Image: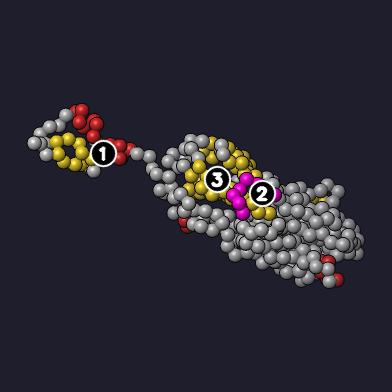
């Protein structure tokens, strides 16, 4: 009787009996070499940081993705008045919103539309500031959308953006720019902080405060929650306020501290989860990502205008099934092993 033998784990024939038919039926070496990679064998990610519309095509061998979406913060409002004795309540912009969705089943080659929302623009009382831009990911089986933070307004509480389409617990709102009972004499409102990653609070970003606190009215800024950015503060002089802190895109980390009210200049709000702080000449531009811009009640006094809101961002991750998941499981930049594409 002839003795069989194995090569690379598969029986390919018998001794002294090599037929073309046997080799074609039993040979497995070629199939092993040419097989498609298993889902998530190599970690990696795409970062969409450029404002505008993009197309994401699922790469070969990828059957599951994890998605993070953050929208833009709203722009702050300012007022121009030649009298240094007038200080109108011009609020900052609301913080953006955040949504995440884990282990989404996809098909290689399928295309998805990715939109990165810009920050809202600051504006004068006569013209108006604008809301932050909506960020989204849409396509087969995915409809995720985060509207931008509201625009700064006169003597009104400004709301953050609204998230939808994420997993349970993965739809979060940024912070408000809080109004007050005094329409004049007590200054502008700071920008709302960028959104956090988890929790059941209505607003996970910090509240942008205003100067009403000097007469024991509780309208000071607040810290972010669950990795959200801190709320922007107002100067004791009442002539301007700062942007809110932003939210980082690398998963839930330390929450941003509230800005410091009542000092000149006000203390900067902290960025949540490694997010950015406010920038600009008077630190009125919201921090990356999703921080709302600060307001200014009297541009004539110190040349301060309202601050623009910060833009949003979209991040798409690959990895072993159920091994990379927001809010904080293996979603750090280092977990992508250097396989990062920035667009």
Classify mark 3: residues with Cα within 10 Å, few (<14), some (14-19) or many (20+): few
Q: Which residue is mark 1?
A: 29
Left or right, 250 with reference to 215: left
Q: CA distance from mark 2 to mark 3?
A: 23 Å
- Segment tinted magenta in the rendering: 162-170
Q: Secondary structure at mark 1?
A: helix
| The label number, if any, that marks residue 89 in the structure image | none
Q: Is residue 239 magenta?
A: no
Q: Residue at x 57, y 46 (%)?
A: 48
In percent of width and height, residue 176 lies at: 74, 57
Q: Are marks 1 and 2 in contact (CB under 8 Å)?
A: no
Left or right, 103 with reference to 81: left
User: Which badge, 2 or 3, is on the more N-terminal residue?
Assistant: 2
Q: Secondary structure at mark 2?
A: strand
| The label number, if any, that marks residue 343 in the structure image | 3
Q: CA distance from mark 1 to mark 2?
A: 49 Å
- The image quarter containing residue 299 is bottom right
Q: Residue at x 86, y 65 (%)?
A: 186
Q: Residue at x 58, y 41 (%)?
A: 142
User: Which badge, 1 or 3, is on the more N-terminal residue?
Assistant: 1
In front of the other: 233 or 105: 105
Q: Is residue 166 magenta?
A: yes
Majority SS type along the magenta span: loop
Left or right, 340 with reference to 211: left
- The image quarter containing residue 298 is bottom right
| The label number, if any, that marks residue 163 in the structure image | 2
User: In this picture, is 245 found above or below 167?
Assistant: below
Can residue 138 be seen in the rendering of this structure?
yes
Classify mark 1: residues with Cα within 10 Å, few (<14), some (14-19) or many (20+): few
In front of the other: 209 or 97: 97
In percent of width and height, residue 138 lies at: 60, 39
Q: Are marks 2 and 3 in contact (CB under 8 Å)?
A: no
């Amino acid at each position: 009787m002839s003795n069989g033998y194995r090569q690379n784990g598969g029986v390919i024939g018998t001794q002294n009996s090599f037929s073309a038919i046997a080799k074609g039926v039993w040979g497995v070496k070629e199939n092993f070499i040419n097989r498609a990679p298993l889902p998530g064998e190599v970690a990696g990610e795409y970062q969409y940081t450029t404002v505008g519309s993009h197309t994401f095509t699922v790469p070969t061998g990828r059957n599951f993705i994890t998605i993070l979406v953050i929208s833009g913060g709203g722009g702050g409002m300012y007022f121009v008045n030649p009298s240094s004795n007038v200080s109108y309540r011009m609020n900052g912009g609301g913080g953006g919103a955040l949504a995440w969705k884990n282990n989404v089943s996809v098909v290689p080659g399928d295309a998805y539309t990715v939109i990165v929302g810009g920050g809202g623009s600051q504006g004068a009382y006569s013209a108006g500031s604008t809301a932050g831009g909506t960020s989204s990911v849409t396509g087969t089986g995915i409809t995720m959308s985060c509207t931008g933070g509201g625009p700064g307004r006169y003597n009104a509480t400004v709301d953050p953006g609204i998230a939808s389409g994420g997993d349970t617990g993965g739809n979060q709102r940024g912070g408000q720019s809080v109004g007050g009972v005094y329409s004049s004499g007590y200054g502008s409102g700071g920008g709302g902080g960028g959104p956090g990653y988890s929790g059941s609070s209505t607003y996970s970003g910090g509240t942008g405060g205003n100067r009403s606190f000097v007469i024991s009215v509780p309208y000071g800024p607040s810290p972010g929650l669950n990795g959200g950015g801190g709320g922007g503060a107002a100067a004791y002089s009442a002539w301007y306020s700062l942007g809110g802190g932003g939210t980082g895109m690398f998963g839930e980390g330390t929450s941003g501290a509230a800005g410091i009210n009542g000092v000149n200049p006000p203390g900067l709000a902290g960025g949540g989860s490694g997010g950015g702080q406010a920038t600009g000449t008077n630190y009125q531009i919201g921090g990356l990502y999703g921080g709302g811009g600060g307001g200014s009640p009297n541009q004539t006094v110190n040349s301060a205008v309202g601050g623009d809101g910060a833009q949003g961002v979209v991040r798409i991750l690959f990895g072993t099934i159920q091994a990379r998941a927001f809010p904080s499981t293996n979603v750090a930049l280092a977990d992508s092993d250097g396989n990062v594409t920035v667009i």
